[in-house]
Amino acid sequence: MDARPRLRLETDVLVVGGGAAGVAAAVTAARQGLDVTLVERYGFCGGGAVAGLSGTVCGLYEATDRRGAGPKQVVFGFADEFCRRLEAMGGLADPVVYGKTWTRVHDPLIWREAADAFLTEAGVRIIFHAVVFGAHMQGDLVQGLEIWTKEGVIDARAPLVIDASGDADVVAMAGFPSVVGDDGRVQNPTMIFRMLGVDVARFAAEYGADTIMPQRISDMIRAQHNAGNYDLPRAKIWLFQTTRPGELLCNCTRVIGEAGRELNTLFWRDFTEAELQGRRQMREYARFFRDHVVGCESAFVNDTGVQVGVRQSRQIAGVETLRNADVVEGTKFVDGIARSPWPIELHSGDKPRVEWLLDDFYEVPFGCFVPERGEGLLAAGRCLSAQHEAVASARVTAQCFAYGHAVGLAASIVVRDKVAPRSIAGVDLRLLLNADGARLEA
Ligand SMILES: Cc1cc2nc3c(=O)[nH]c(=O)nc-3n(C[C@H](O)[C@H](O)[C@H](O)COP(=O)(O)OP(=O)(O)OC[C@H]3O[C@@H](n4cnc5c(N)ncnc54)[C@H](O)[C@@H]3O)c2cc1C
């Protein structure tokens, strides 16, 4: 029981989750004059990018094999606007090489402050430290949400709910169809951490500009692991210099359960085990870096993500589904509302598999955010409707911003014209996005 009085809230749009997608959706909808409420379980925004410390904005630039080519940006709109602001606040590094493409390292603290500024300037009502735990339903229509707060439960009502929870939580609570990974198997989580006290000049001189560490490091990790000297289950690793002096952002763990069991954070036991294993592994990799990686001799772990990083959990079953083939073939759609040049970066099995899309990008159609069944709801972000390997590309931050941008504009149509989300034509949304800086025709 809960003896506290229930609270009531009426708003135009309820956005669940303050990750890249939720922030973009909330700000965009509020800029259209809507009363928007964003609900976030932590006391800050950023989700996987900040609480998960994913650390870089991927998905802005095309990949290429052309020698001497520089970064060619193909994603604009809200993603670009957020990055520019981060940069102006000192929270975004210049593009760095990641294999055949580029990414940009961000400061997670400044990310939070940039999101605060965007949301407050747009007039979004933010409810931090609040967990959505139920959906108000009338048949298949979502009418609002049950929100847990320290003050009591909020009974919140809105004509539109945007599920930007990353995990399609509202879709599941509403009982709408959803999909989990490859027949239930999802990409492994990673505990990201940061090391300070690194001699980055020596590190860079030794290993070069690519943030994907060279084969000789992978070979050494594998040899040390096999010799039983360290427990290092992932050999292909990524280390990024950050905006702060003497620091490396370490994307290297492969969080698996006891006896190599793959973990799915939708299960509370797996989520708990992932946190425990993630912290253990972080210490093993840090010890290995100090012992064997040039420049890391005196380095120490500064922090980990607030939580283990979750790449994949539950996807909505949408009226359209992004296929694996769309990613590798660079498919364009007349109702495409976002672009992605990011490769398939599949974290499954012994080592991450990267499949490049060169000098091109694919588009994501609006239907990937419209539930196959269910009204009053749109999804945004990494929980889009997509096949398993397509998720391994379409989930990165620049794209999540772009999905939120599109869904935020869709929200304004839903509320102003009092129409069902599924009645919106993606081609119309594309026009609105272009008028709002998305440059999908450029
Ligand atoms: C280990 C790892 C490394 C990565 N590396 C990169 C990288 O280098 N570059 C890159 O661009 N991308 C990277 N990604 C991917 C990227 O960070 C995420 O996919 C992206 O941030 C997802 O954004 P989102 O808004 O869809 O969801 P999320 O960021 O997951 O946001 C969802 C938000 O909803 C909140 N929430 C969830 N459920 C509830 C609820 N019931 N009630 C209230 N709030 C709720 C969460 O707290 C969270 O803030 C990485 C991901 C991982 C896991």
Image: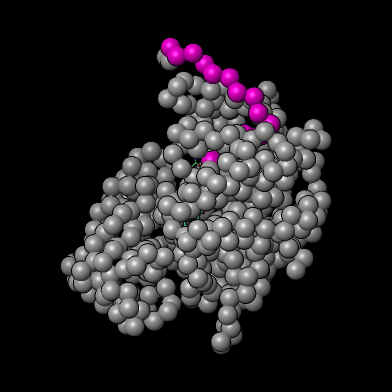
Which region shows up in magenta? Answer: 3-17
Residue 196 to residue 292: above or below:
above
Q: Quadrant of residue 219?
A: bottom left
In this rendered view, identify the residue nearer to me: 320 or 69: 69
- Residue 423, percent from left and from top: 80, 41
Residue occupying image coordinates x 57% and y 37%: 38
- Residue 50, percent from left and from top: 44, 51
Residue occupying image coordinates x 60% and y 23%: 9
Residue occupying image coordinates x 69% and y 43%: 31
| Quarter containing the C terminus | bottom right
Residue 219 to residue 123: above or below:
below
- Residue 182, percent from left and from top: 52, 53
Residue 378 to residue 426: above or below:
above
Horizontal side of residue 245 vs 93, given as left or right = left
Residue occupying image coordinates x 68% and y 23%: 138
Horizontal side of residue 115 vs 227, given as left or right = right
Horizontal side of residue 51 vs 330, given as left or right = left
In this rendered view, identify the residue nearer to me: 421 or 149: 149
